[in-house]
Each structure stands twice: as structure tokens, then as C-alpha cells.
Amino acid sequence: MAKAVALLALCVLAFATIAQSHEEVFDVEGKVYCDTCRVMFPTRVTQYLEGAEVELRCRAIENGTVTYSVSGRSGAGGSYSLKVHGDHQDEICDVVVVSSPDPSCNEIVSEIDSTRLCLTHNSGIESAVRYANPIGFVKTEALTDCAEVLDELSFVPIELQH
């Protein structure tokens, strides 16, 4: 009987070791948009960009050295999906826009050019999928529809609030 218990314990430990040794993979999903009203957030006239290049970069907290990066392009509807290998608990990870396929919407501004992600299983998030906030570029000139759109939102630009 003792041999059976010892054999069972050995099997359980072997399976536990195998389960611990798998590489962690996260799926980062997000969208890239063109801010057609130059207000730094999506509106109903926002255009989502197919073919925009994005990059996920993880940096060491201590010195900012890039420790991991992966690039990709947005597909239909501006959606992108990046596979991230490994746990990045001790790193700061951001997805940033790199290039726009639209020459009239390629201005990069700090308010919407990146989003931060938590890429560790030690965060209380059960899923391996991480949903990133939308990131984007700003159109060279706002669309004429924007005044109506902003009025619908009761949004008054800062320069007009005085």
C-alpha cells in the first residue's frame, strides 16, 4: 500500500512539474484609429485604420532598457492581435503606434499614441487575453462633421471654454 501511495505522489509531482514548465503566452488585442476630429478620443466619425503598424515594448523598471518587443499590423476594422511570450511582471509594457497607412492621418500625439498593459498571470486576471485601449493617429485637419458630433456630445473644446 505504501508503494502505491509513493507511486501516486511521484506521478502527481511529475505532472505538476510539467504543468509549471509551459511557456506563458498572452494575446494582446486592440484597435488603431484615426482621430478625425482632433479631440484625442474616438467619436462616431472616427475611422479605424487597416494596415497601421504597432509595436509592443516591455522595459525594465529599473533602467528603462527594452527587454521584449513584438510588432504587428492592424487588419480590418483597425483591429490588431499580438502574441506575447513570457511573463512580464517586473516590466512596464506599452503598445505604441509606429506608422499610419493614411498620409492625411499620420500625426502622432502623446495623448493617444500608446496604452499600458499588465502582462503577468500574477495580477488576478484569469484570462490570457489582454484588451488594450484604442490607440491612434490624428488627422491633419478635422472633418467638417466634427462640429455637429461634438455638439451632440456637449463637448466644448478647451480653447472655447472661457
Image (spheres, rainbow, N blue to C red):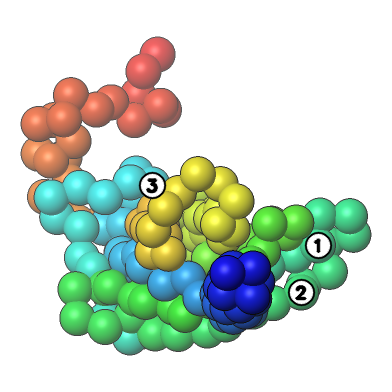
Which sits earlier in the primary sequence, circle 1 or circle 3?
Answer: 3
Label disc, if present, on residue 60 of the rendered structure: 1
Q: Residue at x 35, y 24 (%)?
A: 160
Looking at the rendered structure, the secondary structure element under dot 3 is loop
Q: Residue furthest top?
A: 162
Q: Earlier in the sequence, mark 2 or mark 1?
A: 1
Left or right: 115, with 76 as reference point: right
Question: Which residue is pictured at 84% across the width and 69% down the height?
Answer: 65
Instruction: Report which residue position mark 2 lands on.
Output: 67
Classify the position of the C terminus by image quarter.
Answer: top left
Instruction: Measure the C-alpha gap from mark 2 to mark 3.
Output: 29 Å
Judged left or right of residue 116, residue 79 is left
What is the x, y in percent for residue 130? Answer: 42, 60
Identify the element where label 1 is drawn.
strand
* 14 w.r.t. 45: above or below: below
**How crowded is the residue under tag 1: few (<14 C-alpha within 10 Å), some, or many (20+)?**
some
Q: Position of residue 29 (x, y in %)?
A: 36, 67
Mark 2 belongs to which amino acid? Thr
Secondary element under disc 2, as helix, strand or loop, is strand
Q: Position of residue 159 (x, y in %)?
A: 41, 28
Q: Nearer the viewer, residue 62 or 120?
A: 120
Evaluate if marks 2 and 1 touch, with contact meaning CB atoms under 8 Å apart.
yes
Residue placed farthest to the front in the image?
A: 1
